[in-house]
Image: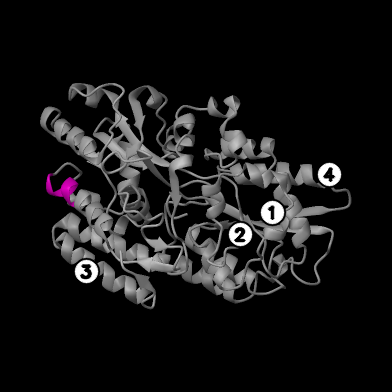
Amino acid sequence: MPVRPTAARSRTTAPPLLLAALLTVAASGTLTACGGGAGSDPDTLKVSFKQSTDNNVRVMDDYLADMKEQFEKAHPGKKVELLPVKAPDAEYYTKVQQMLRSPRTAPDLVYEDTFLINSDITSGYLKPLDEYLDGWKDWDHFAETAKAAARAEDGRTYGVPDGTDTRGLWFNKKILAKAGLPADWQPRTWDDLLTAARTVKKKVPGVIPLNVYTGKAAGEAATMQTFQMLLYGTGDGRTGPLYDEGSQKWVTAGRGFEDALRFVRTVYAEKLGPDVSEALDPNMQTHVRGELLPEGKLAIALDGSWLPQDWGEGAGHAWPTWSEELGLAAMPTQAGQAPGRVSMSGGWTWAVPAKAGNPDLAFEFIKTMQTKANAMKWYLANAGIAVREDVAEDPAYLKARPGLAFFTGLVPVTHYRPAYPAYPRVSTAIQEAMEGVTTGDLSVKEAVEGYDEELRAATDDQVTEG
């Protein structure tokens, strides 16, 4: 996912020459040996997944090896062939789509990012799973918000989520204490958050009061971790302030959209955030988790549940005392209106290609991976957030690592992006509007006008008024 860097959420993209080489390989048909489509061995299940580009990270490999062993033991005579695709996100998406186009190359099961799953659904690459899900009792344990992540515009479900992530406010306890803010600081409104940042700026000079990602360089971190965290907290009366499910149309910028942009503008106009040049640096996310937070240079960060991955023993930025130095607070709704908290989630799903040769066997493998015990094993190995409610309530899971109970507690108030085919262009339009108000080159009104124009172009004018 272009947002969180775990289980196939890489932080980098390949250089142009490498990307060209990968596309050439995909187009040449060298993936045909991977196929699990028509004419394939009915006793061999082919499972395609994203392998980490870091040779030292084998979380997915080890987990699937365990699942393979369990499955083959429970299904005598059946074999599981694991087909890793070692590539950053963009190249992985390209390779997967190449494989899904033909029954000669399609695997029986594929790992799909919720960010782009609807593009593959629209292209006819994936099989709806409703006939399987209707008879699977474990599906009742999945959170409704997670189920919606793989539900298409046609109302059918095309994937089973294997975990998620949530977002909230990380804060440095020492910095807030110096500013006179309470140790259990929990903002109730946007004004509370901005007031805290202003207080830090006044009383603790030399640190960045608040970081919210913004602009095109930040990509989805700007759109999702900042803008939609704000937008879904405005309480504008819609369940989907970017996309209206009822009319199946995208929503033009309304009052909530404008208020979210004003918040971003306030942060940077009042110099409550990093310098604009730093905020628009493509490496800002790396700076936040690798330097600014660990070195005590940032007071409050609106960020994701996955940050501790970088701080563990042997990780890139080991920080064994992070749980003692940092506090956590939910992102509040704009005026404290119900439910009072807001979060956004991403994640990945297991999907069955439309041209898979063994779809029934593929779903049996999903069922193996998604027992309560195996799901918990994956959540903990991958630093993910549970989407099975029975796991989310299990004390063994909640006590497994610091912060897990907090971020899991945000699942009931979380939202997923409307990741329909037009979404990538809509997301870019949001980033451009954010960048305009961040730099001051655009007023909020001008940014909104530009967004609406881009939205109409991106969606072939399939919009409803916000």
Q: Earlier in the sequence, mark 1 or mark 2?
A: 1
> How far separated are the C-alphas under marks 1 and 4?
20 Å
Within 10 Å of disc 1 (Cα), the crowding (few <14, some 14-19, many 20+) is some
Nearer to the camera, 432 or 341: 341
Going by the image, does 161 lie left or right of 461? right
- Is 360 included in the stretch rendered in magenta? no
Q: Which residue type carries mark 3?
A: Glu
> How far separated are the C-alphas under marks 3 and 4?
59 Å
Nearer to the camera, 185 or 59: 185
> How far separated are the C-alphas under marks 3 and 1?
43 Å
Q: Which residue is mark 2?
A: 157
Instruction: Examine the rendered structure and indicate whether residue 376 appears above or below residue 37.
Output: above
Q: Pointers 2 and 4 in contact (CB under 8 A)?
A: no
Q: Which residue type carries mark 4?
A: Ala
> Magenta: predominant secondary structure element?
helix
Going by the image, does 66 lie left or right of 232? right
Q: Which residue is mark 1?
A: 133
Residue appearing at x 74%, y 65% in the figure: 36
Q: Which residue type carries mark 1?
A: Leu
Per the image, label 2 sits on a secondary structure element best described as loop
- Look at the image and give the residue range highlighted in magenta: 265-270
Nearer to the camera, 91 or 118: 118
Q: Which residue is mark 4?
A: 74
